[in-house]
């Protein structure tokens, strides 16, 4: 990471320390929207972060994956409640990878300036995994000059508040991508109860809902896989930031909590826990930085970049979950209470481990890529 990256990190951290303290995270988690529109406008305008990876020709900053990883680590550390992953990462990546210049020119400028919140709807009930495009059953049927969507999507991040829903559906040609306006006829949006209240999920039902085709019909699969991989790197960075915060909380508490006349950090069992977490967090950061580097250098080398994305996601998921659980243990009784922040990180860790492909899915992909297992059909 360069000096510029470090300055970016410091700037984002200062901003998030002011707008996303623990009390605000808890307040926003209880709201229906799940984010503060004023903070979102500042993220887009004052900091230019919402359009971070949007090319300059579409009104964005034109930054790369390395910069995105820095920002996502800080957002994970602060447990920021905002539709950043869904709009600034997933939706932007899906549009850019669609190859549809007209759609990018139409949608990306308003996404970059924060006036349009977008999301990507992929998963469905009955799918083996949220990354399993072969499990897509939502249909796009010809309707007038366009298409009408029929089906249901679930686990859609910020799907209940998004203005634009990029939806994966099947045409006669195969898997395709469609743009759906939030106010379109036949679209029903239902918030879902979630373990992690800081990241809102929704179920979307389509009943002949008018939709615009993005890109070529039946050819969305490869682009979606690349977009999901890029988002996986971003999510791994967010997990690393959360794990680092758990380590910081644990070390701070171990140095101040006194038992038997000594700080508990002086006891070997606690020392070992903290040392183990340090090793895991630093390894997670290395995995993220390696994946970000590969994506910045050659994002279309699907084999190597995809392998790095899955490696980072699998390792960072386990690291974050372990770090959050150990934070609860190191804090003892207070760590189990609702008043302490440890449970917020544990819930985020458990929930994030299932987003954009479970750890099992990514491990199977790694095994297939390096020749240890037969490749599963990820795209049909």
Image (cartoon, rainbow, N blue to C red):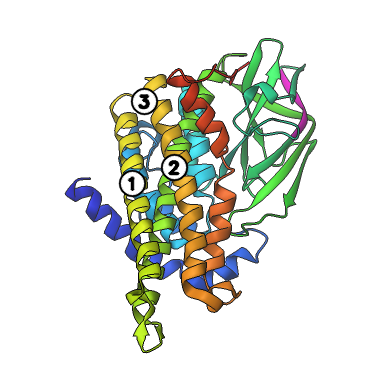
| Residue drawn at the location 63% of the way across and 53% of the way down | 200
235 relative to 204 in the view: left or right: left
Tag 2 and tag 1, C-beta contact below 8 Å:
yes
N-terminal label among 2 and 1: 1
Q: Is residue 148 magenta?
A: yes
Tag in front: 1 or 3: 1
Residue tagged 2: 315
Residue name at image x 55 percent, y 60 percent: 346
Counting from the top left corner in percent of width and height, residue 304 is at 37, 23
The earlier-in-sequence mark between 2 and 3 is 3
Q: Which quadrant is home to the C terminus?
A: top right
CA separation, marks 2 and 1? Answer: 8 Å
Residue 228 sits above or below residue 38 on the image? above
- Residue hosting label 3: 299
Q: Give the magenta range.
A: 146-152
Disc 1 packing (10 Å; few <14; some 14–19; many ≥20)? some
User: Residue 360: where, in percent of width, then height?
Assistant: 57, 35
Q: Secondary structure at mark 3?
A: loop
- Locate residue 1, reporting x and y percent: 22, 45
Magenta span contains residue 312: no
Q: Residue at x 35, y 31 (%)?
A: 57
The residue that mark 1 highlights is 283
Could you tell me how far apart the alpha carbons at marks 1 and 3 are, in whole angstroms?
22 Å
Mark 2 or 3, closer to the camera: 2
Q: Mark 1 or mark 3, which has the lower sequence index?
A: 1
User: In the rendered image of this protein, does residue 14 appear above or below residue 213?
Assistant: below
Q: Find residue 196 and name its label.
A: none
């Amino acid at each position: 990471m360069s000096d510029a990256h470090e300055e970016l990190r410091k700037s984002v951290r200062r901003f998030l320390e002011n707008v996303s303290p623990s009390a605000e995270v808890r307040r926003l988690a209880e709201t229906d929207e799940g984010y503060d529109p004023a903070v979102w406008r500042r993220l887009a305008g004052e900091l230019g972060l919402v359009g971070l990876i949007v090319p300059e020709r579409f009104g964005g900053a034109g930054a790369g994956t390395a910069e995105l990883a820095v920002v996502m680590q800080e957002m994970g550390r602060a447990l920021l409640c905002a539709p950043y992953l869904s709009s600034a990462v997933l939706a932007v990546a899906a549009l850019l990878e669609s190859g549809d210049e007209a759609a990018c020119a139409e949608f990306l400028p308003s996404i970059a300036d924060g006036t349009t919140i977008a999301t990507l709807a992929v998963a469905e009930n009955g799918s083996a995994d949220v990354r399993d495009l072969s499990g897509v059953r939502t249909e796009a049927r010809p309707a007038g000059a366009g298409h009408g969507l029929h089906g249901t999507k679930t686990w859609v991040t910020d799907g209940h508040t998004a203005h634009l829903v990029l939806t994966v559906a099947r045409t006669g040609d195969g898997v395709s991508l469609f743009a759906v306006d939030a106010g379109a006829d036949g679209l029903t949006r239902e918030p879902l109860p979630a373990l992690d209240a800081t990241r809102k999920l929704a179920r979307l039902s389509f009943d002949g809902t008018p939709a615009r085709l993005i890109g070529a019909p039946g050819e969305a699969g490869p682009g979606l896989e690349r977009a999901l991989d890029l988002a996986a790197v971003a999510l791994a960075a967010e997990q690393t930031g959360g794990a680092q915060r758990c380590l910081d909380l644990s070390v701070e508490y171990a140095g101040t909590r006194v038992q038997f006349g000594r700080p508990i950090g002086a006891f070997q069992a606690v020392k070992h826990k903290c040392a183990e977490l340090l090793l895991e967090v630093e390894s997670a950061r290395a995995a993220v930085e390696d994946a970000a580097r590969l994506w910045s250098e050659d994002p279309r080398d699907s084999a190597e970049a995809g392998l790095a994305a899955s490696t980072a996601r699998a390792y960072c998921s386990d690291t974050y979950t372990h770090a959050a659980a150990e934070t609860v243990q190191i804090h003892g009784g207070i760590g189990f209470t609702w008043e302490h922040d440890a449970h917020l990180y544990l819930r985020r860790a458990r929930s994030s481990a299932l987003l954009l492909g479970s750890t099992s899915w990514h491990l199977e992909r790694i095994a297939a890529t390096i020749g240890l297992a037969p490749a599963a059909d990820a795209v049909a």
